[in-house]
Image (spheres, rainbow, N blue to C red):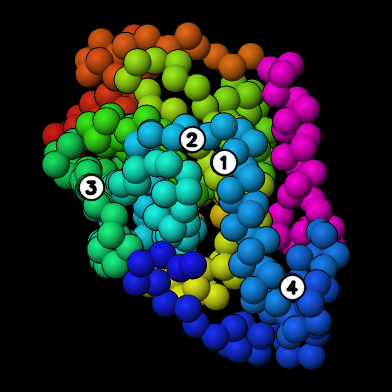
Amino acid sequence: MLARGARYISAAPYQRAVGYTGVKCSLCGERAVVRVAYAGVHLCEKHFSSYFEQRFLETVRLFRMLERGERVAVAVSGGKDSLTLLYLMAKHADRLGVEVAAVLVDEGIRGYREEKARAAEAYAREWGVELFTKAFREEFGFTLDEAVSALMLDGLRYKPCTVCGVFRRYLLNRAALELGADKLATAHNLDDEAQAFLMNAVQANLPSIAREGPRSERVHEKLVPRVKPFYFIPEKEVLTYALLHGIESPQVECPYIVYSLRHPLRRWLNEVAERDPGVKHKIIALKNSLTPFLERGGPFRSCRACGMPSSGEICKACQLRRYVEDLLANR
Ligand code: SF4
């Protein structure tokens, strides 16, 4: 059954786009819409959707991501991955016995965030989920655009994605806390996780490798545990599911993505996956076998400035905030 108000569209455009018009589903012989290369099967619309949803539900159960009676804040950006997660959480909320809310962070990226936020608001309304927004401007006094123009004057000592990521994680956690959420669900998929591993590996950031996983624990009273139900699902499958279920997102890209190390790593990893479809799963398997031998960092304490969780005296968000405020004041 589809979530309230969701549209179910024909798979024909996808079939035409990928040239699957003559290929049969490995399970029922109907027309296939997708090839799951690492599993060596082709699937029709019905079997792919069911396979995808089962993987989502199994990941939630296997890693005990959610308990009955819990409140879950779903982090939405307005991109297809997070909208798909919100759709599935709303669809399966009763089955999982959870209450679902959505949280969005408005960084203040002109020409990008407004468009994505509008999509998130429209879908949340359509699926009957309450959406809460936190904005950089209101919380920190500046937008990401303003912060980046100041960072440029200082030779980009911190990259836009670093600043954005620290502030966004901070505000998502604050929003989840204020909502009384027991868990914060994010739409990180297999590709995101494999890219994150490579980024941490080239930066020799071993504690981050150790900390990243399908779920985190409550290591501080003010840190809402995170869960990632798409942890083992490739991005391509999330996008296929979104397409098949009419979940659309504005075709706009963040202007700061070009500064990110993730950008070239993502391209490279996708090229490798063309030849070795299982490479992303192998990277995650490698990460999971390394993790028990790595130091996780910590313990967490409370930031002296804001009281939120921190690995040092002052949390990263407060440090960066002061740095950007100084830059803006001295322009
Ligand atoms: Fe933020 Fe970087 Fe993502 Fe843009 S690409 S939204 S700056 S993390």
* Magenta run includes residue 283: yes
- Helix, strand or loop at disc 3? strand
Q: Tell me the distance, in whole angstroms, between the alpha carbons under discs 3 and 2.
A: 21 Å
Q: Residue at x 19, y 36 (%)?
A: 140
Contact check, label 4 and label 2, Cβ < 8 Å: no
Q: Residues within 10 Å of mark 2 (few under 14, many from 20)?
A: many
- Helix, strand or loop at disc 1? helix
Q: Residue at x 65, y 89 (%)?
A: 16
Closer to the eye: label 4 or 3:
4
For the C terminus, the quadrant is top left
Q: Tell me the distance, in whole angstroms, between the alpha carbons under discs 3 and 1.
A: 23 Å
Q: Main secondary structure of the magenta part?
A: helix
Look at mark 3 in the image and give the residue it sits on: 132
Look at mark 1 in the image and give the residue it sits on: 60
Q: Which residues are magenta?
A: 265-294
Mark before the other along the chain sequence, 3 or 1: 1
Q: Tell me the distance, in whole angstroms, between the alpha carbons under discs 4 and 2.
A: 29 Å
* 46 lies left or right of 303: right
Does residue 302 sit above or below 112 in this rendering? Answer: above
Look at mark 2 in the image and give the residue it sits on: 66
Under mark 1, the amino acid is: Val
Closer to the eye: label 3 or 1:
1
Q: Tell me the distance, in whole angstroms, between the alpha carbons under discs 4 and 3.
A: 37 Å
Q: Tell me the distance, in whole angstroms, between the alpha carbons under discs 1 and 4.
A: 23 Å
- Helix, strand or loop at disc 2? loop
